[in-house]
Amino acid sequence: MQDLEININDEYLQRLRKLERLSSQKVPVYPSQTAKNASISDFLSDFKQLTKSQKKLVLAGRIKSLRLQGGSAFLHFSDVSGSLQGFIRKDNVGEANYQEFKENYDLGDFVEITGTAFETKTKEPTILASSIKLLSKALLPLADKRAGLKDPDLRFRKRYLDLLANEEVKKVFALRSQVFKNIRDYFDAAGFVEVDTPILQTIAGGATATPFITHHKALDIDLYLRVAPELYLKRLIIGGYEQVYEIARCFRNEGIDHQHNPEFTQIEFYWAYKDYQFLMKFMEKFFQTLVKKVNGSLQVKNGDDVIDFSGPYPQLDFKTALDKALKIDIDKTSDEELAKLAKAAKISVEKSWGRGKLLDELYKKFVRAKIVQPTFIINHPIELSPLAKKLVERPNYVERFQLVVKTVEVCNAFSELNDPLDQEARFKEQKKLKAQGDTEAQGADEDFVEALKQGMPPTAGLGMGIDRLVMLLADTDNIKEVIFFPTMRPKK
C-alpha cells in the first residue's frame, strides 16, 4: 500500500490512506470486540432519566452524517433500532482521540461512542462523547441518502446499498418477516406440525414445472432441485401424520419476470380427512386473519385498486368461466381448435403442448387476467391436475381450487388423489408428455405410487407462494422488490 500513487480526487484511495495511517499508529481498525451495552432505542426511550442520572452508556453504529466545527463535531449514527446525534468535543475526548477521529473517520464507518445524555438548544436528544472508537473502516462511500438509490438494477444487485439508502425497502422486508411469523402462528394454532423434506430429489415431481438438474459425484446420479415438496409431504400423511406443513424454498428453471423468480418460497400443507371445499373456508379465514394482523385492515391498497379480503370470496367454475369467455363448450372443442383459438389470441403455442397446457394458457389470458378481487377458481380440467382427485359427477375435472387476487394465483389446492392405480396411470400420461418434449411434465415417481398402495386417507393439500402474497400486501408488482437477493443476469 505504501507505493500506491494517491489521487486526492479518488475517495477510495483517500480512505485507503487513512486506513494505512491508523494501522501505522497501531490503532485497531477492525477490532473483534466492542463494549456496547445499549441500543439507540434504549437510549432514546430512557433519555429523560439518563439526562438526570448522567449515567455513561456505550453505543455503537454507522456514521450517517458528519459536521466538523473546529474543536468539535456533530455526527449522526445509526444501529438497527434507530438514529441518534453524537457530539464530539476535543475538551471531552482528549486531543489525541479527537485528532484521530477528525483526520481518519468518514461517513459509513462503524464507531463506538461512550458518553452521557444531553439535550441541545434545538431540543435534539444527543450523546455527549467522552470517547469515540473505530469499529470498522468503510473504504467506499455510502449512496447519497437524500437522493436515494433509484436505479432498480443496482438496487437489486447490491441490496445492501438499497437497504442503507432507502428506508422504505426495510419496511417491505419487515412486512415479509411478519407474514412468515403469522403464517407459522396460524398453522401451529390449527394443530399442524412443521416439517422439512429434501431439496435434492431423484425425481422432479409435485408440480408442473421445468426443474434444475445437478449431479451427485459420489452416487454418480443426476438429482433435481425440488419444484415442490408435495410428494414427500404426502408420504408423511401415509406414514401417520394428519397435519403437516413446510415453508419450502423451491426452484423452477423457467423465465424471469415481474411475477417469477427461479428460486422462491412457498408454504405447502396437507390435512388428512379434509377436502378442497373445507380448505376454501379454512383459507378464507386464514387470509382474513393474516391481512388484518399485518395490514391493520382487510382493505389493502395495491396500485390503483383496493383489494377487499373481508369475504366471502366468490367461487368461479373453471369450465363455466372459460366457456363464457371464449363463447364455446371446451368439452366439445378439439385440441386443434383450442390451439387455433390460442394462436388467434397471440399466445405462442408450442408443439409439445398438450390439452391441459392449452386450456391453462387460454384461461390465464381470458379469465384470470380480468380478476381483481379475491376469487376461488374451482374444478380444473384433469389434464392440468395429475395429483388431484376427480369430481365424481364430472370425471374430466378435479376437486381443485386456486385463489386469484389481482390477476395472480396466490394459492393452489386439491382434494388429493389417493387411488394408487389412478395415480400410476396419470404418471404414465405425464411420462408420455415428457417424451414428447414437454419439459414441464412431471416425473413418474414409482416409489410414491408404492407408498400410496400402503393407503393414504382422504387428504386435502395446498401450496401458496409467499413472495406473491407479500407483493400484494406491500403494494408492488415486482417480485424482486420482496426477495432480498433476486436472481439476476451476471454483468460481463
Image (cartoon, rainbow, N blue to C red):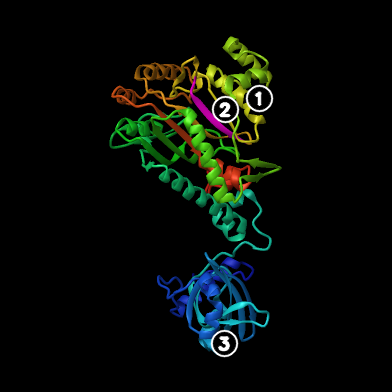
The secondary element bearing badge 2 is classed as: strand
The residue under label 1 is 366
Q: Nearer the viewer, mark 3 or mark 2?
A: 2
As for residue 402 lying within the magenta part, the answer is: yes
Mark seen at residue 90: 3
| Residue 322 % position (x, y) | 62, 20
Disc on the earlier residue, 3 or 2:
3
Inspect the image, locate mark 2, and give the three-letter code of the amino acid beneath it: Ile
Label 2 Cα neighbours within 10 Å, binned few <14 / some 14-19 / many ≥20? many
Asked whether the beta carbons under mark 1 and mark 2 sit within 8 Å of each other, the answer is no
Q: Secondary structure at mark 1?
A: helix
**For the stretch drawn in magenta, what is the main secondary structure?**
strand
Image point (59%, 50%), residue name: 295
Q: CA distance from mark 3 to mark 1?
A: 72 Å
| Side of 193 relative to 264 (left or right) | left
Residue 353 appears in the picture as rendered: no
Q: Which residue carries the number 2 mark?
A: 377
